Amino acid sequence: MQTSQKHHHSSGFDNFYQTTDSRTGSDNGSTGSHSSYPASNVQIFTLESYDVTDSYMAYDSPVAASVSSYMSPVSFSSQGSQSILSEHYRSPENTCESLFTGYPAIAENPSAVLIRNQIIERSKKLGMKELLIWCAQAVSGADSFTAAILIDMLDQRVSVCGEPIQRVGAYMLEGLKARLEESGIKIYRSLHCNEPTSPELLTSMGLLYQICPYWKFAYLSANVVIGEAAENESRIHILDFQIAQGSQWALLIQALAQRPGGPPHIRITGVDDHQSTKARGGGLEMVGEKLSKLAASLNVPFEFHDAEMTDFNFSVQLQNLLIYPSEALIVNFPYVLHHMADESVSTVNHRDQLLRLIKGYSPKVVTLIEQESNTNTAAFVPRFIETLDYYTAMFESIDVKLPKDDDNRIRAEQNCVARDIVNMIACEGAERVERHEVLGKWRARLSMAGFTQYPLSPTVAEVIKNMLNDYSGNYKLAEDKGALILSWKNRAMSTSSAWR
């Protein structure tokens, strides 16, 4: 792995990530880490209580953070098209009225019947994935006759309590129905029936955080980079564009509190979004109060500033973010830049515009964590297949920790993942806010904005590998030209890179 030339030996992370226990957390029998950086065994504090004797339960998740900021999550049913927004996956009698108005009528004439029978016979020989792709092709080609037949058949096969492909299929099928009716954004914006309460949403986020390493991968990899970059800085300003519940910074404050020579003055500017506000049951002042209390208990000089964004394009004037030359600026983009419209959507190109603005402030380091998926400019059918493969892998990784019929798992997937899937399938243009890019494209985009890659040190990989000891051996970590890639089996899921 390519490393920084600077030798990092006194950032405070060495002591902070030392083993504190040997608890067993892996489904494959592996124990907690025994090397110098067992990140998964760190004792940290919840935003609900920073009592240093309490264990920590984080409430942020990558998929939850990826959910649309101005819309609420939704529960889906496995009972077919007439229960698109059911209250409970086993209770079709409690469903809301479907927004899908029905399929095109199939004429009962000999030719139509023959074609329908041929479609049905062919479909019996196909697996779920092939059937979903065939249906997507029919919808894409405006073949409503074939699409209607396949949707009817898929309704009988998908299930939110089934195998991973069945669960992903249930959500993708709803997106296909909306797209076929040319009402994608109408349905997408109406997915609010029986939306979870704030505690329910917070619980769903917390569950996904605990059973999947994707968000811990983001927190820990970015925090080690930030700790190293801030090693000799007396004042740092962290600009976080997806602060969620602030859990990442509780970790960092504790680490920097142990820095030899004392901690720096830390100022955090957090960007808020509707989903996080709902989950925490209030605005960013709640995050600021809790982090301030933690910092005070550790004698860390601390300030908190909030910046609410009005939409996915982060329409905020950076001069209002109080960026001072005397502070080392650190910018954090955790699973959030893919929400921004780029040149394929708007001539304004908000994605590149924000990167250029940030570069203009000469940040000490920029951390970028993104889902490794190519859905931004891909045509509909390739995007459909990419989405199907990505989320099937994610749901497979979830199954390792929880059974398929676990109510909490079902609600977590419905509350935190379903909306992303529907958006990628049902919506186009500015209405489609889920626009992932692969690492190579991010490299090109940041390079064009004037950034150079900041190679991750071996310490970052060591921390992540130790964290993964608490999870299935099917998770893999690989290095790619100074960046890290987290995979489930052979499927790349998330990447972490740093820039300056």
Image (cartoon, helix red, strand yellow):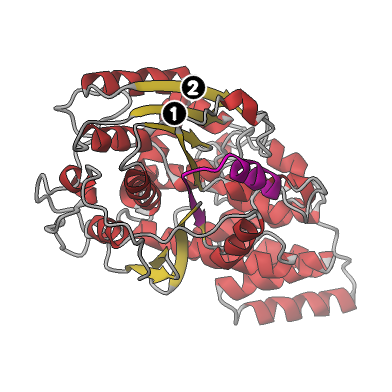
Would you say the residues marked 2 and 1 are in contact, meaning their CB atoms lie under 8 Å apart? yes
* Vertical side of 470 occupied by 323: above or below: above
> Which of the 4 quarters of the picture holds residue 145?
bottom right
> Which of the 4 quarters of the picture holds residue 309?
top right
Query: Residue drawn 19% across and 52% down?
Result: 38
User: Which residue is labeled 2 in the image?
Assistant: 305
Query: Residue drawn 51% across and 26% down?
Result: 278
Q: Residues within 10 Å of mark 2 (few under 14, many from 20)?
A: some
Tell me where residue 195 appears, x and y as whole percent.
55, 31
Q: Amino acid at mark 1?
A: Ile
User: Which residue is labeled 1 in the image?
Assistant: 268
Does the magenta portion include 135?
A: no
Q: Quadrant of the N terminus?
A: bottom left
Tell me where residue 367 appears, x and y as whole percent.
47, 49
Q: CA distance from mark 2 to mark 1?
A: 6 Å
- At mark 1, the secondary structure is strand
Q: Which residues are magenta?
A: 351-370
Query: 67 or 302, which lies in front?
Result: 302
